Amino acid sequence: MTIIGIDLGTTNTAASIFRDGKAELIPNRYGEFLTPSVVLVDETNRLIVGKHAKARLKTHSQHIASVFKRSMGSDTQFSLGERRFTPIELSALVIKVIKDDAEAFLNENISEAIISVPAYFNDNQRQATKIAAEMTGLKVNRLINEPTAAAIAYGLHEKPEDTQFMVLDLGGGTFDVSIMEYFDGILEVHASAGDNFLGGEDFLEAFVDMYLKETETPKTDLSIEKIKSLYSKCQQGLHTLSVKNSVTISDLWEDDKNIVEISRDQFALETASLLDRMRSPMERSLLDANLSANDLDQVILVGGATRMPAISSLVAKLFHKMPLRNLDPDLVVAMGTGIQAGLMSKDKALDDIVLTDVCPYTLGTAIVNNSISAARQGLLFAPIIERNSVVPISKSDEFYTVRDDQEALDFKIYQGESRLVKNNVFLGNLTVNVPKNKAGQEIVDVRFSYDMNGLLEVDATILSTGEKHNKVIDNSGQSLSAEEISASQKKLAEIKIHPRDDEINKHLLFRAESLYESSLGETRADISNTISQFENILQRQNHQEIKNAQKEFSDYLDHFKNDKPL
């Protein structure tokens, strides 16, 4: 039985496996470890997922979906041409490509996986992730929080001494904070917090806005091609700022005469509000864990966006120590999921480790609001399991009838932190019939039991009669029915998806055509001739000849820096 680990990211997705005593990253069809979480419907009405889809992100935006992880667990729909997809379906398409590439690399069928999710994902979002994987035929052995996977990858569970640390995970679209402790073979999460709408994409947008502001250029005045060039150059600029104190943005397109220099200090000032948003979850997690910054032995940075110097600077100021970022921040979570897969497989090279986790949100029920503002405010929230309680956990509380001759109590179950239930996430309900009696005389004991897989069990006992009621809420009151899942599976199965080799060829030709458009003279003629040679080989349909030609064509294109003539 082979179990793979998958880090399903907002911007990129990666996978790994544990074998020969270590976590091994699984390359995709391009021989790369990161597969962009982007889905495209091309001119032939076929679906393309990953690198080639991302390459056309700014030029075919009406046919492309990206950053859909932020909408997981919601009713949002994405339009790709004439087709409409849910975030679950789009995520399933990404997972399917990862699964196919893993099977090709390992030369075996894969049916089980460990999948990482942001620690601050609510139960609806976790369930949506699980359903997406199951649509591809994968059994999800466990959903593991991204900071926990990163901690495992760093080998903190192997340290002999007690270690208390914080993991900061800033990915493309989400920000997670987890405080953990290792002791006696147990990796325990003390507190989690985060922001599901803060990530590297927001910092990129800020960089783009800085350029447009400096050049006094309205974004609406730019063509699709120019917008593509702008984002590409700004992305490169962000990377440059990670190693240099300033970067110059110029020659974005043929008639561009602007030269804009952006320094680290300017960018830090421009993104001050984003950095402030990062502080809040860090401070809240310390408060929930009843710790001070000085109590932490280490702060670990995870996620590609943490390469920005402003992040290291923020951590150093808050915790008076430099953060740790020894492993590739883009791949560390995927590596951790692979190690967890090895633990699930009982690999002999791994010592057993006990992972404990916390409930990231408070769970409770709605109660009557006796305030004079009740009509405007709605029902109040009565917490039963507080956020950051170690799971598995079971807690109970008692609830009373509020009217004479009341015949039933309807327990509406919510997740969140607001005093008003209308601002929290509805998970489900359990209705309990009670004997008629005076107000306050009938009492129902309600017990919530919550486990590491997000399964919430609600037990209600009528104290006067001893009658018991039970309901299991498997992550989400909004989860899809068996019929809805089946319909989505059928829909995805009927969609024509580019074969692995066809997609590689299409991407190579797209790169070459882009080079041709940006070249002149002899270079342009040479590119045109090379494209024709490659197309002639494709027409002959000789598999081995095409394989060899792919390598030669790719090497030829790599001689051009950033897909532009040298």
Image (spheres, helix red, strand yellow):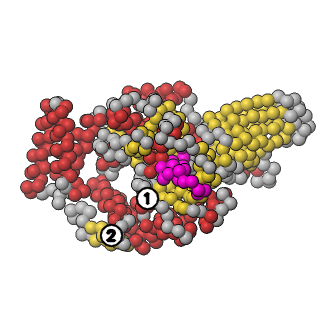
Q: Magenta includes 21?
A: no
410 above or below 326? above
Disc number for residue 562: none
| Cβ atoms at labels 2 and 1 below 8 Å apart | no
126 above or below 212? above
345 or 415: nearer the viewer: 345
Q: To which residue does mark 1 refer?
A: 326
User: Mark 1 belongs to which amino acid?
Assistant: Asn
- Callout 1: 10 Å neighbours few (<14), some, many (20+)? few
Q: Quadrant of the C terminus?
A: bottom left
Q: To which residue does mark 2 refer?
A: 247
- Callout 2: 10 Å neighbours few (<14), some, many (20+)? many
Residue at horizontal 69%, vertical 45%?
363
- Whether residue 78 is visible to the viewer of this picture, yes or no, is no
206 or 329: nearer the viewer: 329
311 above or below 149? below
Residue at horizontal 21%, vertical 52%?
558
415 or 330: nearer the viewer: 330
The residues colored magenta run: 144-163
Residue 353 % position (x, y): 57, 44
Residue 81 % position (x, y): 36, 39
Q: Mark 2 or 1 closer to N-term?
A: 2
